[in-house]
Image (cartoon, grey):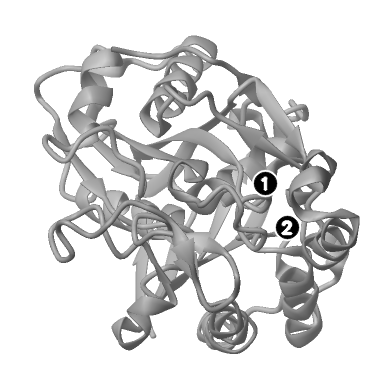
Amino acid sequence: MRTSHYSNIQISAVSVCLPQQTREVDSYVDTFGEENISKFKKMTGVNAVSRALPEQTAADLGIEAGLNLFKNLKVDTSKIKIVVFVSQKPNYRLPSTAYFIHHHLNLSSDCVCFDINLACSGFIYGLNTVAGMLQSYGLEDKALLITADTSIKSLAPNDRTMSMLFGDSGSACLLSKTDNAPQLNFAFKSDGYRFKSIITPSGAFRNIGKPTKRVKWSDDIFRSDYDTHMKGMDVFGFSISDVPALVKDFLNHLNKTEEDYDLFALHQANKYILKQLSRKLKISFEKIHLILDRYGNNSSNSIPLVLADIYGENKEDENSDIFMSGFGAGLSWGCAEATINKNIILKIIKSNKIYD
């Protein structure tokens, strides 16, 4: 377990943007049949997913979340010195999409920009990366973490295991350097030996020239190597064994228990996994706020979406002690704990804005 601790960095704002479209899982009945739909909904808990327009990118959703944050919380954007974009759906091979975001947010050139290629653990990894960098900056300097994905763009349309599961969204999280910040703590693990567990084999430079035509795989689903594929049982085993083991180790490291937290904002993989985590960790399921029934699995953006869904309408000037955990492709998994003022978490917005 790799840990890190910060006493001078705080989460100052959270904004989430969804596309305006929603697709009901029941609308797939003609494709997959009523029996498969019923089984899927029972296992995953997903009834609907947010769905971006074909030409709308993860960056578009992230930019809208950022602009909403600036507008509602009157942020001095000249103080933003770092922009990090966490996504597996960038705009381009080159340059990093963070520069596209930097441009459309009209930020100062006195700024560091880069992308992080991570999925479901991305918010936790991104927070730690930004916090570590911001430590060396001046007081009152700020950083912007954008997490966003449009997962549907790399899923085979007849993949009954994944096409109904993933939703699209973007978020902007503002971090500030300050002398009086509550403690921000992290723990991480990685296992590259299982990198094939969640993979899009082609589309980069390892498997150049692979056929784009979809063919039937051993599970009777038509895919190409340009479609994301997940080894379901491997990922399930990882999620209910490695993830709770890290959570327990981290809680022991902090000398804390469930009672110390108001909310466990966990990656929304599926309902069955969340129930297993609740059981194994002896966490009341009421403390795990379920959102995937309405939005689906939102990859790197699951945790900000949980925060916005539960606190976005709550404008009380009151702190909440939150335990967060993200886990997925890599394989990668991480935990964080933070005290966050509910007042800085904005109401979820929807937009189909597209930036050129």
Mark 2, other Cα within 10 Å: few <14 / some 14–19 / many ≥20: many
Examine the rendered structure and indicate whether residue 108 appears above or below residue 85.
above
Residue under label 2, please give it. Answer: 263
Closer to us: 322 or 239:
239
Examine the rendered structure and indicate whether residue 292 appears above or below residue 42.
above
Q: Position of residue 295 (x, y in %)?
A: 70, 41
Q: Residue at x 26, y 27 (%)?
A: 80
- Say whether residue 189 is visible: no
Q: Quadrant of residue 114?
A: top left
Q: Secondary structure at mark 1?
A: helix
In the picture, the disc for residue 306 is 1
Three-letter code for the amino acid on which mark 2 is drawn: Leu
Q: Position of residue 214 (x, y in %)?
A: 43, 56
Q: Residue at x 85, y 43 (%)?
A: 26
Q: Quadrant of residue 338?
A: bottom right
Q: Residue at x 44, y 52 (%)?
A: 123
Q: Residue at x 27, y 51 (%)?
A: 116
Q: In the displayed structure, does residue 270 sit left or right of residue 136?
A: right
Q: Mark 1 or mark 2, which is nearer the start of the sequence?
A: 2
Q: CA distance from mark 2 to mark 1?
A: 10 Å
Closer to us: 41 or 1:
41
Q: Position of residue 98 (x, y in %)?
A: 23, 33
- Say whether residue 73 is visible: yes
Q: Disc 2 vs disc 1: Cβ atoms closer than 8 Å?
A: yes
Look at the image and tell me in which quarter the N terminus lies.
bottom left
Three-letter code for the amino acid on which mark 1 is drawn: Val
